[in-house]
C-alpha cells in the first residue's frame, strides 16, 4: 500500500465518518424535541368539546386554556403530576424528568462527538421512556375509555433513539477504521524512510 493510497483512504473515511455523526446528532435532536411534541392528544369527542371554547381556562394552576389541553407534551404532563402532589404522581414526574435529563445528556455528548457516553445515556433514556409508557398503561391514561390517546411524541422518541444508536455505533466503527489506517500509514512511512536510508548507503 503506497502512501498516496493510504491518504486517499483516510480522506474517504473522514467523509464517511461525517455521515454517522449527522445521524447521531439528528437522532439526539429528535429525542430531545419529543419532550415538546404531543405525547397525549385528545380524542375526537373530547377535542370537539375543548375546541368549542378554546380560550376558556382548563386548569388555572397550570395556566392552561382548553386549546392548550388538546395536545399535552411530556413537560406539561410532568407539571400536572407535580401539581397532584401524591407519591404516585411524584414518581411519574420524576421518571419524566429523568428521561429528559438523559435525553439532554445524549444531545450534549452527540454534539461533543462522544459516541460511547451518548450510547449509554440513550439506553438510559430508552429505559425511562419504557417506564413512562408502563406507568401510563397502569394508570389507563391512554386507554380506549380515556379522553386522550397516545400522541406522535412517543414515536418520535423511539425514532430518535434508533437513529442516535445507529449513528453512534457507525461512528465507533469509522473511528476504529481510521485508527487502523493511521497505523498502516505510520508503518508505510517507516518503510519509506528505511528504503531511503538503504538507498543512500548503497550510493
Image (cartoon, rainbow, N blue to C red):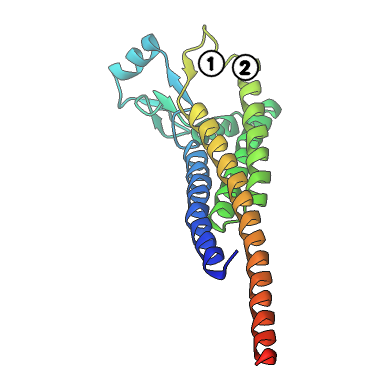
Residue placed furthest toward the top? 145
Depth order, front residue of 3/195? 195
On residue 166, the disc is none
Question: Image point 44% across, 29% down: which residue?
Answer: 38
Figure check: 14 above or below 71: below
| x then y, percent, for residue 37 | 44, 33
Residue 177 is drawn in which quadrant? Answer: bottom right
User: Which residue has dot 2 on it?
Assistant: 137
Depth order, front residue of 48/123? 123
| x then y, percent, for residue 54 | 30, 24
| x then y, percent, for residue 93 | 62, 34
| x then y, percent, for residue 69 | 41, 25
Q: Secondary structure at mark 1?
A: loop
Q: Quadrant of the N terminus?
A: bottom right
Depth order, front residue of 181/42? 181
Question: Image point 54% across, 62% down: which residue?
Answer: 10
Query: Could you tell me if the residues under marks 1 and 2 are in contact, i.e. CB atoms within 8 Å?
Result: yes
On residue 142, the disc is 1
Figure check: 88 above or below 43: below
Amino acid at each position: 500500500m503506497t502512501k498516496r493510497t493510504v491518504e486517499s483512504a483516510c480522506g474517504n473515511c473522514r467523509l464517511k465518518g461525517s455521515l454517522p455523526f449527522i445521524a447521531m446528532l439528528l437522532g439526539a435532536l429528535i429525542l430531545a424535541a419529543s419532550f415538546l411534541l404531543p405525547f397525549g392528544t385528545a380524542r375526537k369527542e373530547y377535542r370537539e368539546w375543548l375546541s368549542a371554547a378554546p380560550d376558556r381556562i382548563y386548569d388555572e394552576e397550570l395556566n392552561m386554556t382548553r386549546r392548550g389541553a388538546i395536545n399535552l407534551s411530556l413537560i406539561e404532563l410532568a407539571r400536572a403530576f407535580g401539581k397532584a402532589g401524591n407519591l404516585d404522581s411524584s414518581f411519574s414526574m420524576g421518571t419524566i424528568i429523568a428521561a429528559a435529563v438523559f435525553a439532554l445528556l445524549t444531545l450534549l455528548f452527540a454534539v461533543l462527538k462522544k459516541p460511547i457516553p451518548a450510547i449509554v445515556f440513550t439506553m438510559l433514556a430508552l429505559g425511562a421512556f419504557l417506564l413512562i409508557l408502563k406507568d401510563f398503561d397502569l394508570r389507563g391514561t391512554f386507554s380506549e375509555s380515556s379522553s386522550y390517546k397516545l400522541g406522535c411524541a412517543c414515536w418520535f422518541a423511539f425514532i430518535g433513539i434508533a437513529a442516535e444508536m445507529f449513528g453512534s455505533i457507525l461512528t465507533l466503527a469509522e473511528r476504529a477504521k481510521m485508527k487502523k489506517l493511521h497505523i498502516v500509514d505510520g508503518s508505510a512511512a517507516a518503510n519509506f524512510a528505511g528504503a531511503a536510508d538503504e538507498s543512500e548507503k548503497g550510493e
